[in-house]
Image (spheres, rainbow, N blue to C red):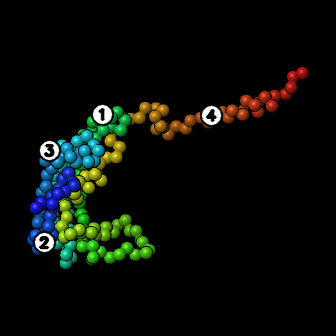
């Protein structure tokens, strides 16, 4: 019986069936999968999505996935809401280990931005290449897509480095009256 998936783009891989020297895998999204991914990501469309991946053993019971994804997506312009076509290119490099082999997080955490990310947990001895590619696609999307040549209009909250003159205090007029000599 095939296990149902909840991901719109699924390519499950069993660690037990992975060759010792690893394997190269090319995956592409069908039109239906692209439409489902677009819906899942909240964008207008995914017209093309492919990934070239190398999947090979890591340590004694883990897996490493390395490769690159390419996609053509359509998002809404944040200013005009018109469609904006974009290309997404993302590198993938992940390591997976069974949860029992992942060391507990130390109490004191040192963050080194140049260090490799720690291994991800490998649930039930298998993983999903489609999910990995979809997650990297989501990370590669432009959070504020703009149609070429479109900019915020003046007064829309974005200024070109000009400071507005300070507004006059409502008490400035009263102060002026107080400072005026009485004419009797």
Q: Which mark is residue 167?
A: 4
Q: Which residue is at the far front?
A: 1
Q: Position of residue 22 (x, y in %)?
A: 12, 69
62 above or below 75?
below
The residue labelled by disc 1 is 82
Cβ–Cβ under 8 Å for marks 4 and 1: no
The quadrant the C terminus occupies is: top right
Q: Which mark is residue 16?
A: 2
Work out whether residue 37 can be spotted.
yes
Mark 2 to mark 3 CA distance (whole Å): 31 Å
Q: Which residue is at the far top?
A: 184
Give the residue at x 40% y 75%.
106
Q: How many neighbours does mark 3 have within 10 angstroms: few (below 14), some (14-19), or many (20 or more)?
A: some
Earlier in the chain: of badge 2 and badge 3, it is 2
Q: How many neighbours does mark 4 have within 10 angstroms: few (below 14), some (14-19), or many (20 or more)?
A: few
Q: Secondary structure at mark 1?
A: loop
Earlier in the chain: of badge 4 and badge 1, it is 1
- Between tags 2 and 4, which lies in front? 2
Give the residue at x 81% y 28%.
180
Mark 2 to mark 4 CA distance (whole Å): 71 Å
Q: Secondary structure at mark 4?
A: loop
The residue labelled by disc 3 is 31
Choose top left, top right, bottom left or bottom right for residue 112.
Answer: bottom left
- Between tags 3 and 1, which lies in front? 3
Q: How many neighbours does mark 2 have within 10 angstroms: few (below 14), some (14-19), or many (20 or more)?
A: few
Q: Secondary structure at mark 3?
A: helix
Name the side, left or right, on which 17 lies relative to 81. left
Mark 4 to mark 1 CA distance (whole Å): 37 Å
Q: Position of residue 177 (x, y in %)?
A: 78, 28
In-front residue for pair 33/124 = 124
Cβ–Cβ under 8 Å for marks 3 and 4: no
Choose top left, top right, bottom left or bottom right for residue 72.
Answer: top left
């Amino acid at each position: 019986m095939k296990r149902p998936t909840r991901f719109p783009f699924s390519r499950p891989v069993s660690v037990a069936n992975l060759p010792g020297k690893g394997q190269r895998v090319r995956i592409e999204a069908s039109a239906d999968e692209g439409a489902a991914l677009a819906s899942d990501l909240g964008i207008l469309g995914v017209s093309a999505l492919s990934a070239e991946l190398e999947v090979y053993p890591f340590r004694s019971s883990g897996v490493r996935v390395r490769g690159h994804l390419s996609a053509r997506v359509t998002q809404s312009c944040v200013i005009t809401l018109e469609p904006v076509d974009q290309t997404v290119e993302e590198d993938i490099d992940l390591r997976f280990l069974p949860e029992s082999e992942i060391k507990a997080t130390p109490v004191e955490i040192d963050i080194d931005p140049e260090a490799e990310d720690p291994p991800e947990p490998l649930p039930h001895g298998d993983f999903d290449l489609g999910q990995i590619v979809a997650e990297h696609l989501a990370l590669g999307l432009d959070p504020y897509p703009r149609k070429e040549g479109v900019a915020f209009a003046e007064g829309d909250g974005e200024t070109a480095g000009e400071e507005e003159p300070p507004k006059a205090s409502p008490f400035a007029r009263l102060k002026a009256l107080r400072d005026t000599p009485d004419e009797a």
